[in-house]
Image (cartoon, rainbow, N blue to C red):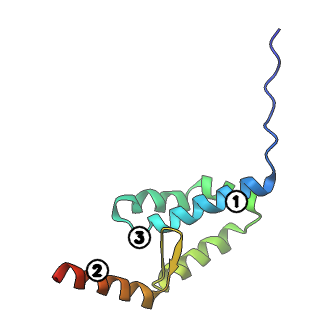
Amino acid sequence: MRKGATEPDIPLEAVQSLLTRVIWQAVADLSVDAYQSEAQRFFAGQIFVEYCDILGWNVRRARASLGKFLDSGSRISGNHLLTGPELAVQRGSAAAAVAI
């Protein structure tokens, strides 16, 4: 006789941490041409709605905050937040390195 499958006992905090990291990566992907359309679909889709529900976030507010963040010119690089001015300096340094 086969026993029924049981749900793994994973703490809610661990799930929330993982979902937050997935969202953080999707925000970073919005700045990468190769991943931008996939990230946009993620934020417009049902999976993002479900993640917001698990995290206790209001979907409308989360999407509005995302829009404000993107409009600010700030971006995420790896695990680091880059503000608009920091991003400009980074791009300037990269352009100078290429010119050398």
Residue occupying image coordinates x 73% and y 58%: 16
Residue 33, horizontal then vertical, whole percent: 34, 64
- Label 2, secondary structure: give it: helix
Screen quadrant of the N terminus: top right
Residue 92, horizontal then vertical, whole percent: 30, 87
Residue 91, horizontal then vertical, whole percent: 32, 82
Q: Earlier in the sequence, mark 2 or mark 1?
A: 1
**Residue 46: mark in rendering:** none
Screen quadrant of the C terminus: bottom left
Q: Quadrant of residue 32?
A: bottom left
Nearer the viewer's eye, disc 1 or disc 3? 1
For label 3, the residue is: 31
Depicted 99 relative to depicted 21: above or below: below
Residue projecting furthest to the bottom? 85
CB atoms of marks 2 and 1 within 8 Å? no
- The three-letter code of the residue at mark 2 reads Ala
- Label 1, secondary structure: give it: helix
For label 2, the residue is: 94
For label 1, the residue is: 17
Q: Nearer the viewer, residue 59 or 87?
A: 87
Nearer the viewer's eye, disc 3 or disc 2? 2
Residue projecting furthest to the top? 1
**Label 3 – label 2 distance at C-alpha:** 16 Å
- The three-letter code of the residue at mark 1 reads Ser
Nearer the viewer's eye, disc 2 or disc 1? 2
Depicted 83 relative to depicted 10: above or below: below
**Label 1 – label 3 distance at C-alpha:** 22 Å
Residue occupying image coordinates x 80% and y 13%: 2
Q: Earlier in the sequence, mark 1 or mark 3?
A: 1
Badge 2 density bin: few <14, some 14–19, many ≥20, Cα 10 Å: few
